[in-house]
């Protein structure tokens, strides 16, 4: 029987669990720990200016980016909560150069958690929506301890993925491979309630989202594709440019309204010829969500979730959104347009 307030995310998880033969409930309990972590992070995000945790810590993360205090807080909350859950064997975070091992004496489980603790944090001071992205894999190696191969699995091996969006309302969007569901946090009861059942991305949209300030650094296929979207013609709509600069926010809008989000490779930094976004912490989980909603995700040359990860912080170009727009981009990259 559903709650009179609506279906909670826990009820939804349990209903999904009942469909899986041999399910033990470990996955549901683990995800509930992640949900609690997000509630704690959300509490701090909403009062960040009051408790003086905005601004930089003075440290830099593995990508050389200055670490904000709220990033560090979110990272620590997730690490502590998930280590105590007893269902994780190892974790990987965008903020940590190495795998995050479970503390001594803590029982290890069969799941691997990869996460971006606070995506879009450069926008915190401007009160722009930010988010937490997560990807869950099942441990493949034998024994109690993990192997690096447990973390470096292709996107199609994910058992769940999603994100929490901290904005005008706080949302959780996730998939376990059976469609995509969205939940909105009701602050009066502290529960995520089902608000967006069975999310489907429109097959074709009218919005493109990209940082146009990097135009001069793009490769020709990217320029030609964006130029095509910008110019009106009789056989296509006029596309509007919408770009927030917070990946979770830009992706969430694309998921609901359709269209395409791009963060292509560029020629600006010869040390980063493969784009900016991280395969394991950003591209793979959002690609899983997008595909389960009926969309597509590509590097321009191949499906993102088929890439074999080579290291924890591998970067890739990302073109993600409605099938029509993603397939059109691939045509430009193949030289067919």
Image (cartoon, rainbow, N blue to C red):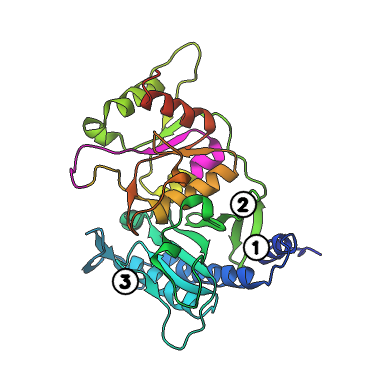
Task: Name which of mark 1 and mark 2 comes first in the sequence.
Answer: 1
Task: State the extent of the magenta-drawn residues as a range.
Answer: 252-271
3D distance between C-alphas at marks 1 and 2: 16 Å
Residue 141 at least partly seen = yes
In contact (CB < 8 Å): disc 1 and disc 3: no
Task: Name which of mark 1 and mark 3 comes first in the sequence.
Answer: 1
Q: Which residue is mark 2?
A: 177
Instruction: Tell us which disc is closer to us: 1 or 2.
Output: 2
Instruction: Tell us which disc is closer to us: 1 or 3.
Output: 1
Residue 189 at least partly seen = no
SS at circle 3: loop
At 44% across and 43% down in the image, what residue appears?
304
Residue 115 at what x, y percent from top left? 43, 62
Against 256, residue 206 (above or below) is: above
Q: Residue furthest bottom?
A: 105
At 48% across and 67% down in the image, what residue appears?
112
At 18% across and 43% down in the image, what residue appears?
270
3D distance between C-alphas at marks 1 and 3: 32 Å
Residue 223 at what x, y percent from top left? 30, 26
User: Any mark on residue 9, and which?
Assistant: 1
Q: Nearer the viewer, residue 188 or 277?
A: 277
Task: Name which of mark 2 and mark 3 comes first in the sequence.
Answer: 3
Q: Residues within 10 Å of mark 1 (few under 14, many from 20)?
A: many
Q: Nearer the viewer, residue 97 or 140?
A: 140
User: Any mark on residue 52, and which?
Assistant: 3
- Specify the quadrant of the image occupied by residue 240: top left
Residue 36 at what x, y percent from top left? 54, 71
């Amino acid at each position: 029987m559903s709650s009179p307030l609506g279906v909670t995310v826990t009820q939804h998880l349990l209903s999904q669990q009942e469909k899986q033969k041999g399910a033990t409930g470990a996955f549901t309990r683990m995800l509930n720990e992640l949900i609690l972590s997000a509630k704690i992070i959300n509490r701090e995000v909403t009062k960040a200016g009051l408790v003086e945790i905005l601004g930089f810590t003075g440290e830099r993360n593995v990508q050389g980016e200055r670490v904000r205090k709220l990033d560090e807080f979110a990272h620590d909350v997730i690490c502590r909560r998930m280590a105590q859950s007893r269902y994780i064997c190892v974790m990987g975070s965008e903020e940590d150069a190495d795998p995050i091992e479970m503390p001594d004496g803590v029982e290890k489980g069969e799941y691997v958690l990869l996460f971006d603790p606070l995506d879009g944090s450069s926008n915190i001071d401007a009160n722009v929506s930010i988010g937490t992205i997560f990807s869950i894999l099942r441990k493949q190696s034998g024994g109690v301890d993990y192997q690096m191969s447990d973390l470096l699995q292709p996107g199609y091996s994910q058992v769940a993925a999603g994100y929490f969006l901290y904005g005008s309302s706080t949302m959780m969007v996730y998939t376990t491979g059976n469609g995509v569901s969205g939940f909105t946090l009701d602050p009066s009861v502290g529960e995520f309630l089902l608000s967006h059942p069975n999310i489907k991305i429109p097959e074709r949209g009218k919005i493109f989202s990209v940082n146009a300030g990097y135009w001069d650094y793009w490769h020709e296929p990217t320029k030609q594709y964006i130029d095509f979207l910008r110019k009106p013609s009789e056989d296509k709509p006029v596309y509007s440019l919408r770009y927030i600069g917070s990946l979770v926010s830009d992706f969430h809008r694309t998921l609901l309204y359709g269209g395409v989000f791009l963060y292509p490779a560029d020629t600006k930094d010869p040390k980063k010829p493969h784009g900016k976004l991280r395969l394991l912490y950003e591209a793979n989980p959002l690609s899983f969500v997008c595909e389960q909603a009926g969309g597509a995700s590509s590097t321009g040359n191949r499906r993102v979730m088929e890439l074999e990860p080579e290291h924890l912080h591998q970067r890739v170009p990302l073109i993600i959104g409605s099938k029509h727009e993603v397939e059109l981009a691939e045509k430009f990259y193949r030289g067919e347009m």
